[in-house]
Image (tube, rainbow, N blue to C red):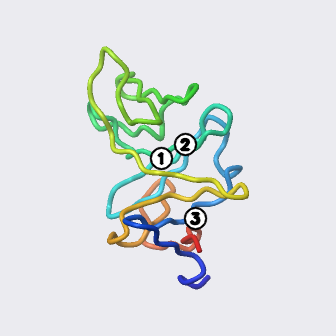
Amino acid sequence: MSQEKDQENTGDLKWYRIGPVTDIPPLGSRVVQHCGVRIAIFRAHQDAIFAVRDQCPHRQGPLSQGIVHDQRVTCPLHGWVIELATGEAVKPDVGCTPRYPTRVDDGVISLGVPALAPELKPLDDAPRDVADDVTQDA
């Protein structure tokens, strides 16, 4: 796909098409990489879509491997609960992981990232340097 067709710049954000909502299991996640940072995209309760850095603010555990419940995720390392809408840890814990804007158009998820940043790269279990299955919104 051409970049002109697959990319949209709006203000300070560049929007990337991640794929269909149905590619993420209910109460599951998918991970992409942006500027060397892993971003977890979650499909929460009632198909709400959220994106946060794939790193718990406590001990940097992989949130994408946690248990998704309602609109929260529980870190698999030490059980911290993170609000997906804000990235904030649930009390009594204190901390925050950065969040990223998402949108869904015709069942397709898009992720907003800073416009001046390098390309977005999909991840399976290990980082890859190809972006064949991630496209940028038009």
- Which quadrant holds residue 115? bottom left
Label 2 residue SS:
strand
Where 133 falls versus 72 (above or below)? below
Q: Label 1's element? A: strand
Kind of residue at badge 1: Ala
Q: Nearer the viewer, residue 80 or 114?
A: 114
In the rendered image, the residue lying farthest to the top is: 92
Q: CA distance from mark 2 to mark 3?
A: 15 Å
Dot placed on the residue nearer the N-terminal end, 2 or 3: 3
Tag 3 or tag 1, which sits nearer the N-term?
3
Secondary structure, mark 3, is strand
- The alpha-carbon separation of the residues under discs 1 and 3 comes to 13 Å
For this view, does 22 lie left or right of residue 18?
right
**In front here: 101 or 19?**
101
Which numbered marker is on residue 42? 2
Find disc 3 in the rendering and name its residue.
17
- Residue 119: which disc? none
Identify the residue position indicated by label 1 in the image: 51
The first of marks 1 and 2 along the sequence is: 2
**Residue 58: image location, x then y, percent:** 27, 30
Alpha carbon distance from label 1 to label 2: 6 Å
Lateral position of residue 105 relative to residue 63, left or right: right
- Which image quadrant is residue 48 in? top right
- Is residue 131 positioned above or below 48 on the image? below
Residue 13 location, x and y as percent?
Answer: 41, 64
| Amino acid type, residue under disc 2 in the picture | Phe
